[in-house]
Image: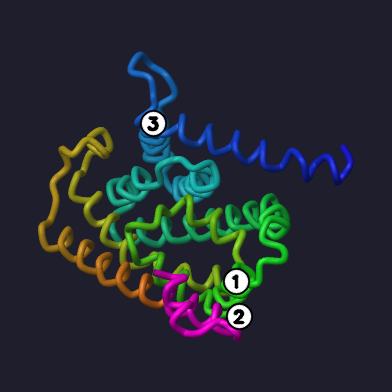
């Protein structure tokens, strides 16, 4: 297949991939034994639990695959608390999530970056915003990692089509640490893999509210910060545009 034809079918392949992601989610799983990613991951956790010392390596590998494949990592994060405890579980989740997120970022960058660039070519405003986001990539990715409104798996691929450097993206993964520890701890309270994701596991009100507060603060900060970066980028890209029109452009 030549390069020109590949570029033409890229949007079709991306759309097909998005369709598979949606239909593979738990909400779309068939009641009568259809594809159910949550149950698959629970079975994987039970298998890991019986592996002993090599279970940690297997867990990291499964977490990486789940992240790249858009499977619900929350089950694995909670399950890590059951199988490994808070300290080891948090460490393993962070390693698996960071490697998986980096691989997904690279897939997004090399599978879609060229296509997106072609679409915005000649548009000074989009190009400037993309460049500005690239310069401030570490801060933006860090804040989005802390905010719960940005889906983890989707963000991995989405950041790949921006100007964020791989280095900034990788090191900004530290933003996952607070949420990782909190969810692993909540999972450790369950003590039973079967109850994960069912709403039956016990919860700690203090931890639950801490997650909500940190997430809310991060959401406000990332919204304000990205808006500020976008306004500055537009002003630099279109110098003849007055500040009032820039404000109107961004709402």
**Quadrant in which the C terminus appears:** bottom left
- The percent coordinates of residue 156 (x first, y second) are 52, 56
Q: Residue at x 43, y 80 (%)?
A: 228
**Quadrant in which the N terminus appears:** top right
Give SS at disc 2: loop
Badge 1 crowding class, 10 Å Cα cut-off, few under 14, some 14 to 19, many 20 or more, is some
**Residue 43: which disc?**
3
- The percent coordinates of residue 215 (x first, y second) are 27, 65
Q: Which secondary structure is most common in the magenta stretch?
A: helix
**Residue 125: which disc?**
1
Task: Determine whether, in the image, residue 244 is placed left or right of residue 202.
Answer: right
- The percent coordinates of residue 3 (x first, y second) are 86, 46
Q: Earlier in the sequence, mark 2 or mark 1?
A: 1
Q: Earlier in the sequence, mark 3 or mark 1?
A: 3
> Is the residue 132 above or below the residue 8 in the image?
below
- The percent coordinates of residue 51 (x first, y second) are 43, 40
Segment tinted magenta in the rendering:
226-251
Residue closer to the observer: 146 or 48: 146
Residue on which disc 2 sits:
238
Task: Determine whether, in the image, residue 43 is placed left or right of residue 129.
Answer: left
């Amino acid at each position: 297949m030549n390069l020109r034809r590949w570029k033409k079918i890229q949007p079709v392949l991306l759309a097909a991939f998005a369709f598979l992601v949606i239909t593979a989610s738990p909400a779309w799983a068939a009641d009568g034994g259809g594809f159910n990613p949550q149950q698959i991951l629970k079975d994987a956790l039970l298998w890991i639990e019986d592996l002993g010392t090599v279970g940690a390596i297997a867990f990291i590998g499964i977490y990486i695959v789940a992240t790249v494949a858009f499977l619900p990592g929350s089950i694995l994060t909670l399950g890590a608390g059951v199988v490994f405890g808070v300290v080891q579980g948090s460490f393993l989740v962070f390693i698996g999530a960071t490697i998986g997120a980096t691989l997904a970022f690279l897939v997004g960058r090399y599978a879609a970056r060229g296509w997106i660039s072609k679409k915005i070519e000649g548009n000074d405003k989009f190009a400037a915003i993309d460049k500005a986001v690239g310069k401030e990539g570490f801060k933006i990715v860090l804040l989005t990692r802390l905010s719960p409104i940005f889906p983890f798996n989707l963000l991995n691929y989405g950041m790949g089509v921006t100007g964020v450097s791989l280095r900034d993206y990788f090191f900004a993964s530290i933003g996952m640490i607070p949420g990782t520890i909190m969810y692993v701890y909540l999972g450790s309270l369950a003590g039973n893999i079967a109850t994960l994701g069912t709403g039956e596991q016990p919860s700690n009100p203090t931890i639950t509210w801490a997650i909500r507060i940190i997430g809310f603060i991060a959401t406000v900060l990332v919204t304000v910060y990205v808006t500020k970066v976008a306004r500055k980028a537009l002003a630099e890209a279109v110098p003849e545009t007055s500040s009032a029109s820039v404000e109107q452009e961004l709402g």
